[in-house]
Every structure is written in C-alpha cells, then in structure tokens.
Image (spheres, coloured by chain):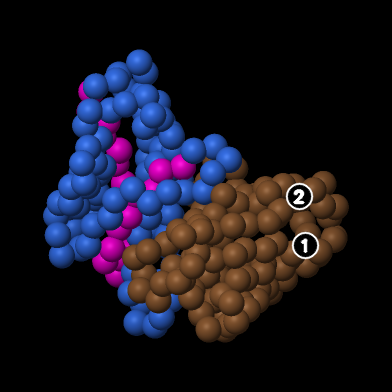
Chain colours: A blue, B brown
Amino acid sequence: DQQVKQNSPSLSVQEGRISILNCDYTNSMFDYFLWYKKYPAEGPTFLISISSIKDKNEDGRFTVFLNKSAKHLSLHIVPSQPGDSAVYFCAAIGNSGGSNYKLTFGKGTLLTVNP
Amino acid sequence: ETGVTQSPTHLIKTRGQQVTLRCSSQSGHNTVSWYQQALGQGPQFIFQYYREEENGRGNFPPRFSGLQFPNYSSELNVNALELDDSALYLCASSPRDRYGYTFGSGTRLTVV
C-alpha cells in the first residue's frame, strides 16, 4: 500500500519555466513533509520541507505548498535550470507516538530541464 | 564536517551468501537509518538505530539485521541473500530530532 504517491514518473520543462512536481499521501498521521533530490550514483539530498501546520514554505527558487484537506503537496521550481535535472522524491514523516521517525518515500519523479 | 560515508560502493554476491554493509554517520549525528531502494522505486525504510539499539523496523524479514557502534557508525547485515535483495542500500544519519537526515551515496548490491 503506497502511502506516498508521485503519480508522474517523469516531467520535462524548458529552462527558465516553472517546474511543478506533485505528491499525494493517504496517511493522516503524516505531519512533516520533505522533498529530496537525487542524482545518479549519489544519495538523496535534502531540498526543502514543510510542517503540517503551514501551507507554504519558500527557499530561493523552491517553494513547497501543502493542502492538508486534499492530502496533497507540490514543489515549484522557478525558474528551472538544467542543473535541476534529477529524480525528485517526496517523503513524509508521521509521529506514531513512539520514537520511530522513519521517512516514507514516493517512487520519485524524473525532472528533465531542457536548455 | 564529514558527511555520511558508506562502504563498499558496489558489491556482487551469490544467492544464499551473507553480506555486511557499513556506514559512518555524519559528525554529531547519533541516529542511523537504513533504506533499500529497488530499481524504479523510492527508498524503503529497513530499520533505525539509536544508542546502539534498534529503534523501529520496516517490513523486512529477520534476515536483515543491523548494529550501531558507540561511535554511531552502523552495519547492515543480510543473510541468505535472494535475487530480490539486489538494490541500492542507503544509510542516513540524523541528530535525535527528525528533521536533519543526511544520506550517504549508497551501496549497490547485486545478487546473482
């Protein structure tokens, strides 16, 4: 059962335009969300995060939006650059009441930014 | 400040064998988690260690086991390897709060 879903396996955009990556989740216990970026032969690198008490978090060219009622979040990259080409993972953390802070990941979206 | 380092980077094993993967956590991080990333999938949580004890486990069989050492480094052991164990194994360290996960580059395990 996929609790974090990234329904678009790939996305292609032109340099300078906006990239929008989407993520849906099903577990209401998730209260913190993260986006990771992964290049081939490297581990995931943290990009940006958002707590469930917020609906938006911005860091430079990256903005994450959270719609709790729809259990949906999105990552906006403006403007997109060729160096942004990578696999983007959405991940969620839920406080299960214990001390287990595991990340639950989606399957990832391959973003290609064309020059 | 050094990041998370994993060894080896690549490994080929035969079905039925045992394997040990190693991880050195980032300085100041006392919690280590292991993830398995199969081809085309997102990383899947295996288990987490804190203060040398297992602190949570995902849906993996007991032949996946681990250790954490006093210097917070960690090992992942897999016994009786199966073909489906072929994957990228990622180690992530963090301070005790849950926000600061740093991942290593992973170990690519191929079981033949």
Q: Secondary structure at mark 2?
A: strand
Q: Nearer the viewer, residue B53 or B74?
A: B74
Q: Is residue A66 left or right of residue A92?
A: left
Q: Which residues are magenta?
A: A17-38
Q: Is residue A85 visible?
A: yes
Q: Which residue is mark 2?
A: B11
Q: Report which residue position mark 1 lands on.
A: B19
Indicate whether A15 appears above or below B106: above
- Residue kind at label 1, given as amino acid type: Val
x and y percentages locating residue A73 in the rendered image: 24, 49
Residue A83: image x %, image y %?
Answer: 39, 29
Q: Is residue A62 magenta?
A: no
Cα distance in 3D space between marks 2 and 1: 9 Å
In the figure, B90 relative to B32: above or below? above
Rate crowding at label 1 as few (under 14), some (14 to 19) or many (20 or more) other CA atoms within 10 Å: some
The residue type indicated by label 2 comes to Leu
Relative side of B67 to A59, left or right = right
Chain to which mark 2 belongs: B
